[in-house]
């Protein structure tokens, strides 16, 4: 029988797991569940005889993919697939997919949860600031960026975006100002929200020079990946400018140093939880299960990324 493994270090909501199970079993497949595993060996053992794999930020590296001798498809239930070794998947004839857009709303809402908390000084009773009339930059205008822009406009913010892969007209049609360069975006926006993928071009691309272009009382919001930040550059800008704030749900490696030195000016969620809502888990988890069924039964490769 075709076996579908859901391997999630950070589990989906129970209701999502139930939905995945129903889809998998209705197709005549078997669901195998590995949640909250603590060692890679558990994942390696679990993948050994499965045909399909659903993961979140779980690492599907070459070792995992090669150990999964029957594997035909791996679906990252979410947007970013930098946790899958695509070359290893391709080498082994394994199809890799993501589920674009399915958890976008959850991430977009968290961006504003963190922004408001930051603007109100962590609700410590002191006078904060409002969002209305402030400048807001969207760095990459994909599914999340588009939603974030919409919410920012709802707050009465002046919204700009930079995304070389999205047609200017698409951005302008949303009433968002198109920036011609990353530098222009950062120079013009007090708030910048990051929605870039982590790849060769973007890793460590958010550096001191770029951040130092931001206006007074700058706030960088990162719900993308920690790898895109040049952490030394972040430390340097926080040291150089006591008006600069950094909030993120993908905590940096130097989190401890930042929190110790700049307590009030940085905030990190205890765990990556942008996509951690019942709705996002249901949307992304069920989409992943449906994509697997559709691929195994009909050879459907929509959403293939390798
Ligand atoms: C994504 O790429 O979809 C988000 O970063 C969510 O990741 P998660 O599934 O680990 O919460």
Image (spheres, grey):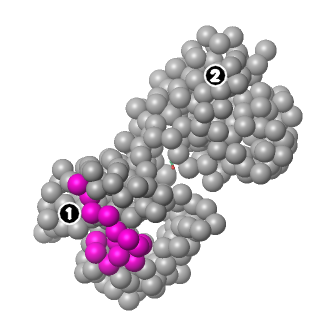
On the question of residue 275 being in view, the answer is yes
Q: Which mark is residue 158?
A: 1
Helix, strand or loop for disc 2: helix
**Left or right of 237 in this view: 122:** left
- Read off the residue under disc 2: 294
From what the image shows, is residue 281 above or below residue 66? above
Whole-percent x and y of residue 262? 37, 77
The residue drawn where x is 56% and y is 49% is 80
From what the image shows, is residue 226 above or below residue 148? below
Q: Nearer the viewer, residue 42 or 230?
A: 230
Q: Which residues are magenta?
A: 175-189
Of the 4 image quadrants, the one containing the C terminus is top right
**Left or right of 113 in this view: 127:** left
Q: Earlier in the sequence, mark 1 or mark 2?
A: 1
Label 1, residues with CA under 10 Å away: few <14, some 14-19, many ≥20:
some
- Mark 1 close to ligand 1, CB under 8 Å: no
Helix, strand or loop for disc 1: strand
Q: Which picture quadrant has residue 209?
A: bottom left
As measured in the structure, the alpha-carbon distance from the residue carrying label 1 to the one carrying label 2 is 42 Å
């Amino acid at each position: 029988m075709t076996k579908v493994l859901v391997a999630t270090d950070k589990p989906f909501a129970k209701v999502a797991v139930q939905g995945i199970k129903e889809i998998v079993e209705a197709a005549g497949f078997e669901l195998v569940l590995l949640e909250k595993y603590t060692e890679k060996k558990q994942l390696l053992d679990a993948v050994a005889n499965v045909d399909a794999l659903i993961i979140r930020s779980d690492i599907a590296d070459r070792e995992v993919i090669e150990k999964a001798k029957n594997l035909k498809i791996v679906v990252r239930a979410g947007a970013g697939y930098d946790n899958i070794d695509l070359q290893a998947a391709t080498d082994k004839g394994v199809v890799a997919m993501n589920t674009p857009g399915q958890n976008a709303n959850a991430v977009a809402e968290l961006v504003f949860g963190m922004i408001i908390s930051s603007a109100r000084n962590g609700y410590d009773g002191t006078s904060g600031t409002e969002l209305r009339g402030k400048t807001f930059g969207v760095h990459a205008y994909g599914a999340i960026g588009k939603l974030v822009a919409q919410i920012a406009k709802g707050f009465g913010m002046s919204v700009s975006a930079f995304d070389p892969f999205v047609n200017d007209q698409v951005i302008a049609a949303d009433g968002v100002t198109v920036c011609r360069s990353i530098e222009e975006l950062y120079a013009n926006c007090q708030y910048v929200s990051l929605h870039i993928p982590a790849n060769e071009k973007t890793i460590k691309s958010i550096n001191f020079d770029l951040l130092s272009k931001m206006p007074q009382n700058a706030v960088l919001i990162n719900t993308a990946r920690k790898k895109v930040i040049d952490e030394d550059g972040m430390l340097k800008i926080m040291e150089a400018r006591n008006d600069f704030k950094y909030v993120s749900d993908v905590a940096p490696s130097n989190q401890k140093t930042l929190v110790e030195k700049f307590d009030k000016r940085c905030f990190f969620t205890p765990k990556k939880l942008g996509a951690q809502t019942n709705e996002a888990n249901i949307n992304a988890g069920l989409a992943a299960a449906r994509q697997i069924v559709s691929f195994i039964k009909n050879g459907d490769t929509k959403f293939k990324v390798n």
